[in-house]
Amino acid sequence: MMWFFAIFAMAGGAAQLVDGTLGMGFGVTSATILLSMGVTAAAASAATHAAKLPTTFVSGLTHWRRGNVDTGTFLRIAVPGALMAFIGAVVLVNLSLATAKTWMSGLLLLLGLVIFLRFGFNRRLIPAPRRGHTARWLSPIGALGGLVDSLGGGGWGPVVTPSLMTVTNHEPRKVVGSVNAAEFFVALFASAGFLTGAEKLENDMPWFAVLGLVTGGVIVAPFAARLAGRLPHHVMGTLVGGLILLVNGQVLLLAAGVAASATWWVMAAAAVATAVVAKASYVYDKAERAAASACETSPTELTAQP
């Protein structure tokens, strides 16, 4: 059993490294892994949110201490996000098992596509509005993120982080920090929603896997917060999005009656395509680093140069 625990600890650590640096990834990655193990949709989402409680608390606290959290943005997304996460959890618990699993795989596939396009092709999904930092824009984003998060077992980051990077003028570390801090309350209220159907989930909860995810996530969370904005996040995001597309795509293909041998060929081709796009996406990371270096060079420094 120790190897099983170690695998989930490594998975939790890797997922938290991605989440802490990109502002997304822990929930959808963990839920995807649990679904592939045969865990029911409601149990997978409940387990993921249980695992996120300590990891998001540590991550959010670290981001706050490092000045990565904007209080106004945090409140405007956390409150509606938490309320809608509770409602989504109650709905998911009462869906039929077959319907819920197909629904969750489809939703995770969509979220994987969002991540893949965002980082692999640098494509933003919505135009940047004026005064995007106000509650008029941020509250609906938080509400949608909370609902998708509880129904899909993850999705808070993929919905909220790219949206905030578009509608606000905050630097990436402020967006990632605010989203991570708010995610704790979203996970807390989602967990409360799942408790309303505790008797239905009691025999399906993979507690040993949850413990592994928590252990790895908590250990990595402080380091991930310190690395926010420093790692090649376009490459990382592309690989994460591709992984989510691969696993959930196979689930949906099998559910549609496609032969297992055929799905493996499709997955192999998709894996190669993901690697190619990830390699190409590094150009966006280099461009961002060059722009950041240019901004850090002050006019005084420029005039002082011979």
Image (cartoon, grey):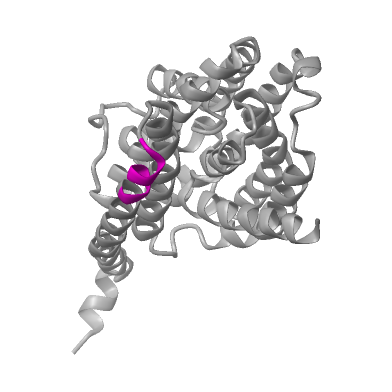
Determine which quarter of the picture holds residue 40: top right
Question: Which residue occupies 37% across, 33% down?
Answer: 253
Q: Can residue 161 be seen in this view?
A: no
Residue 157 spot, x, y in % from top left: 48, 38
The relative height of residue 248 versus residue 290 in the rendered view (above or below) is above
Q: Does the magenta stretch include residue 232?
A: no
Left or right of residue 30: residue 57: right
Residue 92 spot, x, y in % from top left: 60, 16
Left or right of residue 213: residue 156: left
The relative height of residue 166 versus residue 269 in the rendered view (above or below) is above
Left or right of residue 140: residue 306: left
Question: Which residue occupies 59% across, 52% down?
Answer: 16
Looking at the rendering, the stretch of residues picked out in magenta corresponds to 259-265
Quadrant including the N terminus: bottom right
Residue 106 spot, x, y in % from top left: 42, 27
Quadrant including the C terminus: bottom left
Determine which quarter of the picture holds residue 129: top left
